[in-house]
Image: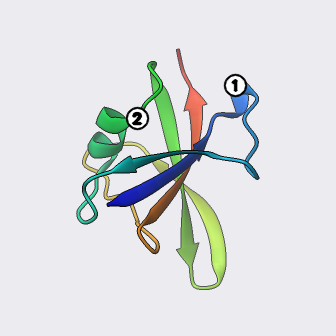
Amino acid sequence: MTRVKYFIPEDGDDEQHPNLFTLSKDKGLTLKDLRNAFPVPGVYHFRILRSIGTTKVWMDALDDATDIPVDDKCIFAKVTRLR
C-alpha cells in the first residue's frame, strides 16, 4: 500500500498540512495510476516531490506512462487544478 500526500494550492491547501489517500499498488506506479485514484474530481497537473541526492525537487509528471517515484511507501504531490 502506498500513501499519497497532496495539496492543491488553488483550494487553499497548505504544503505543511497535506491531504492523504492510499493506493493499493506499491510498485510500478505511473501517473495514470495516480490520476485514476485521485479522490478530487477535476483535471489536474501533478508535480511529484523527488529526492536527487540530498536535494528535494518538484518533478512535473507530464505523461500517463511516467513512473512515479515512491519514497518509503509514500508519494508527495503538488496538484494544480486546470479545470
Q: Please give the count of numbered marks on the rendered protein.
A: 2
Q: Is residue 8 left or right of residue 29?
A: right
x, y (%) of residue 7? 63, 41
User: In the image, what residue type sits under mark 2?
Assistant: Phe
Rendering quarter of residue 63? top left
x, y (%) of residue 45? 50, 34
Determine the residue positioned at 40% across, 65% down. 69
Q: Residues within 10 Å of mark 2 (few under 14, many from 20)?
A: some
Q: Secondary structure at mark 1?
A: helix
- Above or below for 3 versus 20: below
- Above or below for 31 versus 48: above
Which quarter shows the N terminus?
bottom left
The residue where tag 2 is placed is 38
Determine the residue positioned at 46% across, 63% down. 74
- Above or below for 24 versus 7: below
Mark 1 and mark 2 lie on one chain; the one further toward the N terminus is 1
User: In the image, what residue type sits under mark 1?
Assistant: Asp
Rendering quarter of residue 51? bottom right
The residue where tag 1 is placed is 11
x, y (%) of residue 33? 28, 44
Q: Secondary structure at mark 2?
A: loop
Q: Residues within 10 Å of mark 1 (few under 14, many from 20)?
A: few
Q: Is residue 21 left or right of residue 53?
A: left
Determine the residue positioned at 25% across, 48% down. 65
Q: Nearer the viewer, residue 37 or 82?
A: 37
Q: What separation in Å lies between label 1 and label 2 (alpha carbons)?
A: 15 Å
Determine the residue positioned at 41% across, 68% down. 73
Q: Nearer the viewer, residue 9 or 39?
A: 39
